Amino acid sequence: MNDMNKKLYQLAPDLTICRILNGMWQVAGGHGYVDQELAIADMLRYHDAGFTTWDLADIYGPAEDFIGEFRRRLLKVKGKEELSKIQALTKWVPQPSRITRSIVNRDIETSLRRMGVSSLDLLQFHWWDYNNPYYMDALKYLYDLRDQGHIKHLGLTNFDTEHMEIIADSGLQIISNQVQYSIIDRRPEVKMIPFCMEHKISLLAYGSICGGLISERYVGAKEPATALLNTLSLRKYKKMIDAWGGWNLFQSLLLTLQTIAKKYNVSIANVATNYILAKSAVAGVIIGARLGIVDHIRDNIRVFNFNLDKSDCDSIDAICTKANNLFEIIGDCGEEYR
Ligand SMILES: NC(=O)c1ccc[n+]([C@@H]2O[C@H](COP(=O)([O-])OP(=O)(O)OC[C@H]3O[C@@H](n4cnc5c(N)ncnc54)[C@H](OP(=O)(O)O)[C@@H]3O)[C@@H](O)[C@H]2O)c1
């Protein structure tokens, strides 16, 4: 039985999302050849399965155009009511130069046109370099666009707690921050989650299944050489596992997750996703979708069918006490990008 209450999250009074979001970084290259026709057909299948929320960015190759085409196709096939069920959360990732109002207006207009919408559901803002102070100007211009109705809500991605605090102190209201958060990478727990709880800001987590490394496929597997990892995502999170504690400790974690997965008759990825979804401040987990190549729709829908109990979480946490502290090694959320 599928529990719809567990499946949905109200990010804002007028914005309810599916707690598993379909991640579109995977269409940007480095994850296999993407055929537009097959990709759009898959987007319709995700939608039909109830996965109605998409995470994308202006810099994710054709992702915004895919949303535009998907919307046109859905309208044609299923009509207006079905179209209204989509949530498309994009990002604005500008180069950290001097940001002017006209740059912001131009870039947001481009996203609106590509996605075929009159207002963005959520615009998540990324900034590469805190030494460049223009991020506050950028945010103010974005707020003006929000007031004019071109953007419904503003969020951030990969901001650390210190800079979230600066933004909150300036009176600018943001509803979310998107950060890497998994059983392996628990940096959000140090400062970010307490801050978000206090300021009623939601987290959208990515990397929660480490590009697919946290799955049955790697149980008992020999440590893969980088050259054998066939997506950018797998390579990115393998490095994270190396910093966390290495392949042997990761194998112990996989075995523990497998035991729990068997108990609920679900998959290891389901357990890892469920574990993060149950954490404070977490609104949703973004799972990357290699559209038109492979999908895990039938498996991922099972995340909503069970709850981990305390003994499950304790056994996962016991493994993690043997790992390195990534907050000490890398720093707060988003530091890996700076
Ligand atoms: N804000 C940021 O800086 C940032 C950074 C990274 C990602 N993101 C967002 O987060 C999304 C997720 O990307 P990610 O890199 O973190 O990847 P991820 O979600 O950790 O991994 C995605 C991969 O996991 C595998 N997978 C999915 N469901 C599975 C299941 N049930 N069982 C086994 N394997 C499964 C698939 O691999 P196969 O396709 O090989 O089967 C899929 O391609 C991105 O698309 C993007 O939207 C944001």
Image (spheres, grey):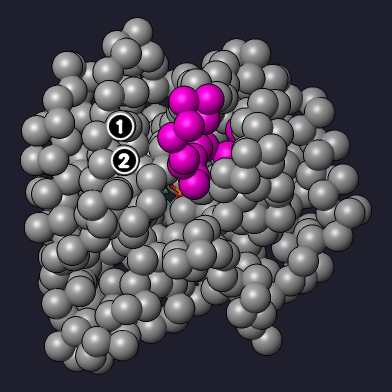
Q: Residue 288 bears which disc, if any?
A: none
Q: Quadrant of the C terminus?
A: top left
Cα distance, mark 1 to mark 2?
Answer: 5 Å
The residue located at (65%, 75%) in the rendering is 5
Q: Quadrant of the N terminus?
A: bottom right
Over which residues does the magenta segment extend? 168-185
Report the side of 125 relative to 36 (left or right): right
**Residue at mark 1:** 140
Q: Check contact, mark 1 vs mark 2: CB within 8 A.
A: yes
- Provide residue 57's location: percent of width, then percent of height: 27, 46
Q: Please state which of residues 78 and 104 is positioned toward the viewer in this rendering.
A: 104
* Residue type pointed to by label 1: Lys
Tell me which secondary structure the magenta stretch mostly adopts: loop
- Provide residue 281's location: percent of width, then percent of height: 65, 47
Report the side of 195 relative to 218 (left or right): right
**Residue at mark 2:** 143
Res 21 visible:
yes
The residue located at (20%, 72%) in the rendering is 70
- Provide residue 236's location: percent of width, then percent of height: 42, 32
